[in-house]
Amino acid sequence: MKRRISYLAAVSIIFIVVIVLTLMVTESREATTPAYHSKIAQLSNSSHWYYEIYKNNQLIIKQSHIPGVKGIQGFQSKEEAQKVATVVVKKLVKGDFPTVSKEELEELSITFKN
């Protein structure tokens, strides 16, 4: 009986140690993952909008026109700029290059001229 209790105690301790180590590794990974966020604003003297992307509170992208289309075309609304900024942030978080294709813009219903 004592042997069985000792065995259960040892297994319980090992289980607890594994859980604690797993939590520690997860926290350290989260601490090293850059924090990305976006800000949306209206261009001065214009009806167009733009977005900025920040990594750990440092500006890394300022996009004042719609990426992936011909010419310089501004975002028609705050919502359109936010949609594209969200896509860019998701790509950066995954480690992908933050390009936006014409097809992605069409899927997001972004207004632009061909």
Image (tube, helix red, strand yellow):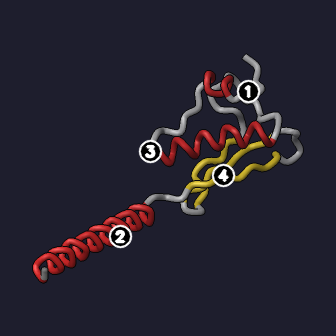
Q: CA distance from mark 2 to mark 4?
A: 29 Å
The residue lying at 66 percent from left, 25 percent from top is 107
Amino acid beneath label 3: Gly
Placement of the N terminus among the 4 image quadrants: bottom left
Q: Are marks 1 and 4 in contact (CB under 8 Å)?
A: no
To which quarter of the image does residue 104 belong? top right
Q: Secondary structure at mark 1?
A: loop
Mark 3 → mark 1, Cα distance in angstroms? 25 Å
**Residue 38: image tag:** 4
Who comes first in sequence, dot 1 or dot 2? 2
Is residue 109 or residue 111 the one in the foreground?
A: 109
The residue at which mark 3 appears reads as 95
The residue beneath circle 2 is 24
Earlier-in-chain disc, 2 versus 4: 2
Q: Is residue 2 left or right of residue 80?
A: left
On the image, the x and y values in percent for residue 58 come to 58, 60
- Disc 2 or disc 4, which is closer to the eye? 2
**Amino acid type of the residue tagged 2 in the rendering:** Met
